[in-house]
């Protein structure tokens, strides 16, 4: 019953947060200079549509009728969201926003998934090494490198990688994209190899952007555990070093798993900068292009999907922590 109540409470809190963000997005569109919905309706009328046709087309794009009272517009907007109707794209006439967002989402997931996992594994290994050998120059150098990486903005890392590996050393294809147009789509070596080649630099950027934080967090956690009484007691009892190391790892890693789940959601925020630099066709690049084309329904849909991913990751972290930590479960 406790787990069921906890799950219900987290889901309700997540839905409330999504509703708050959706509401803020709705009023943000209304408050923008020129009111994009009214501007789009006027544009359609100028192209020969009747006012009634322009109103219906605008309502399909934005999810509400722009000249209705604000409360009626908001009700219509929420009703459309409850039916998973995100509207219709302005730039790609007639194409549902849900289709556009769904086609970009997997590419961002691929980058974020591999980037988070690689940064976690590398950062944890470096963190354990620097904690165990914290009095050596090697540990000092690794800690300094981790601090520098942790302090660098993700877009700076992306620009440096793009310049070095596509201009100075033309190892990877310039111009971005996710696959070469010369390859035939399908499960063949050429197409899959092209996907991997185009994803290497964005994944490397994700990895470098997160490895410093993982290293410093792991080092701090391991040093804290090494000073606990139960580790001293285990050493005094004459337990094997491997057994002691297992105790250290088990207790030092517990806080990191919660942060790992949250990191999957937060990585979507960095997608805007990384995908824009490498011209990679994920959610981040979709948001940037929708801003330039003033395709507000697509921008709204992509932003909502990122928010849902972040909230879902936080709920997952809260629910999994009692599972991996018996102390929390018993309490």
Image (tube, helix red, strand yellow):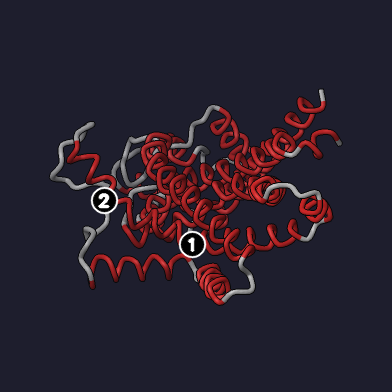
Q: Position of residue 61 (x, y in %)?
A: 43, 39
114 left or right, relative to 240: left
Cα gap from disc 2 to disc 1, whole angstroms: 20 Å
Q: Is residue 50 above or below residue 164?
A: above
The residue nearer to you, when weighing 112 against 247, is 247
- The answer to whether residue 64 of the structure is visible from this angle is yes
**First in residue order: circle 2 vs circle 1:** 2
Q: Quadrant of the C terminus?
A: top right
What residue is shown at x 81% (from left), y 22% (from top)? 1
Q: Which residue is mark 1?
A: 209
**Element type at mark 2:** helix
Q: Position of residue 238 (x, y in %)?
A: 76, 50
What residue is shown at x 32% (from left), y 59% (from top)? 278
83 left or right, relative to 217: left
Res 176 quadrant in image: bottom left
How many residues crowd around disc 2 within 10 Å: few (fewer than 14), some, or many (20 or more)? some
Considering every residue shown, the one lying at the far right of the view is: 331
Considering every residue shown, the one lying at the far left of the view is: 182
User: Looking at the image, do the residues carrying marks 2 and 1 touch, with CB atoms under 8 Å apart?
Assistant: no
The residue nearer to you, when weighing 39 against 112, is 112
The residue nearer to you, when weighing 265 against 304, is 265
Res 143 quadrant in image: bottom right
The residue nearer to you, when weighing 243 against 158, is 243
Q: Which mark is residue 5?
A: none
Q: Position of residue 157 (x, y in %)?
A: 42, 68
Q: Which residue is mark 2?
A: 197
Res 276 quadrant in image: bottom left
102 left or right, relative to 174: right
How many residues crowd around disc 1 within 10 Å: few (fewer than 14), some, or many (20 or more)? many
């Amino acid at each position: 019953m406790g787990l069921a109540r906890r799950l219900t409470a987290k889901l309700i809190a997540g839905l409330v947060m999504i509703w708050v963000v959706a509401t803020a997005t709705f009023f943000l569109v209304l408050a923008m200079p020129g009111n994009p919905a009214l501007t789009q309706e006027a544009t359609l009328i100028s192209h020969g549509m009747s006012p009634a046709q322009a109103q219906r087309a605008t309502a399909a794009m934005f999810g509400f009728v722009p000249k209705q009272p604000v409360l009626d517009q908001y009700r219509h907007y929420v009703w459309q969201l409850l039916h998973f109707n995100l509207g219709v794209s302005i730039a790609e006439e007639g194409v549902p926003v849900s289709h556009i967002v769904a086609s970009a989402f997997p590419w961002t997931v691929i980058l974020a998934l591999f980037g988070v996992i690689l940064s976690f594994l590398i950062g944890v290994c470096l963190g354990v090494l620097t904690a165990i050998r914290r009095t050596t120059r090697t540990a000092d150098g690794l800690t300094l490198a981790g601090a520098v990486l942790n302090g660098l903005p993700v877009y700076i890392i992306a620009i440096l990688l793009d310049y070095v590996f596509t201009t100075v050393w033309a190892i990877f294809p310039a111009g971005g994209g996710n696959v070469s147009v010369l390859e035939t789509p399908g499960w063949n070596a050429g197409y899959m190899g092209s996907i991997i080649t185009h994803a290497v630099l964005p994944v490397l950027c994700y990895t470098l952007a997160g490895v410093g934080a993982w290293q410093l967090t792991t080092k701090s956690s391991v040093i804290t555990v090494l000073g606990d009484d139960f580790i001293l007691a285990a050493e005094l009892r004459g337990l094997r070093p491997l057994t002691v190391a297992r105790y250290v790892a088990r207790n030092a890693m517990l806080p990191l798993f919660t942060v790992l789940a949250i990191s999957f959601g937060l990585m979507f925020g960095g997608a805007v900068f990384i995908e824009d630099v490498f011209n990679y066709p994920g959610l981040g690049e979709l948001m940037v292009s929708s801003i330039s084309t003033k395709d507000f329904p697509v921008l709204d849909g992509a932003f909502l999907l990122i928010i849902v991913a972040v909230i879902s990751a936080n709920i997952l972290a809260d629910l999994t922590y009692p599972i991996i930590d018996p102390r929390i479960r018993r309490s």
